[in-house]
Every structure is written in structure tokens, then in C-alpha cells.
Amino acid sequence: MKFTLALISLLAAVTIAVPVSRKRGDTLPVMTNGNGEIVPFDSEAVVVT
């Protein structure tokens, strides 16, 4: 009885722990300008200080 309960508890914990992944349609980074419009990401324009 204890073994069955432990097994069910383990399976429930694994089921809850499985991450839910949502596939994104876009994989390109997106930036917005001051007006909130989406502009393409330009990695060469990034300034790191």
C-alpha cells in the first residue's frame, strides 16, 4: 500500500514538473523604437560600454 502511494505521488510530481513549452513562430530578436513600432534587430549597432 505504501509503495503504491509512493509510486502515485512520484508520478504526480513528475507530471507537474514537466515543463510546458510553446513553440514560437518567430525566432528573430525584435526591438521597438520610441513610437513602439517594431524594428529589426541590428547587432552591429549595439554599443557595449
Image (cartoon, rainbow, N blue to C red):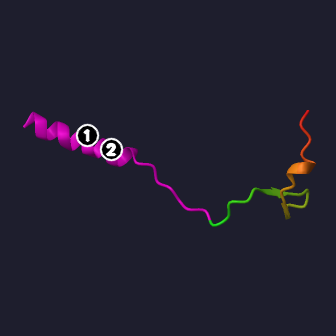
Q: Are marks 1 and 2 in contact (CB under 8 Å)?
A: yes
31 vs 17, left or right, is right
Prevailing secondary structure of the magenta residues: helix
Could you say which is closer to the camera, residue 41 or residue 11? 41
Instruction: List the residue tagged with mark 1.
Output: 10
Q: Is residue 37 above or below residue 12?
A: below
Q: Residues within 10 Å of mark 1 (few under 14, many from 20)?
A: few
Q: As shown in the figure, which amino acid type bears the numbered disc 1? A: Leu
Instruction: List the residue tagged with mark 2.
Output: 14
SS at mark 2 in the image: helix
Q: As shown in the figure, which amino acid type bears the numbered disc 2? A: Val
43 vs 28, left or right, is right
Q: Position of residue 16 (x, y in %)?
A: 36, 47
Could you say which is closer to the camera, residue 47 or residue 6? 47
Q: Which mark is residue 25?
A: none
Kindly report the distance in space between the C-alpha atoms of the residues bearing marks 1 and 2: 6 Å
Q: Residues within 10 Å of mark 2 (few under 14, many from 20)?
A: few
Could you say which is closer to the camera, residue 17 or residue 35? 17
Q: Position of residue 4 (x, y in %)?
A: 12, 41
Q: Is residue 22 magenta?
A: yes
| Residue 5 falls in image quadrant | top left
Q: Is residue 46 above or below residue 31?
A: above
| Residue 37 falls in image quadrant | bottom right
The image quadrant where one finds the N terminus is top left
SS at mark 1 in the image: helix
For the magenta stretch, what is the residue range? 1-24
Q: Position of residue 27 (x, y in %)?
A: 68, 60
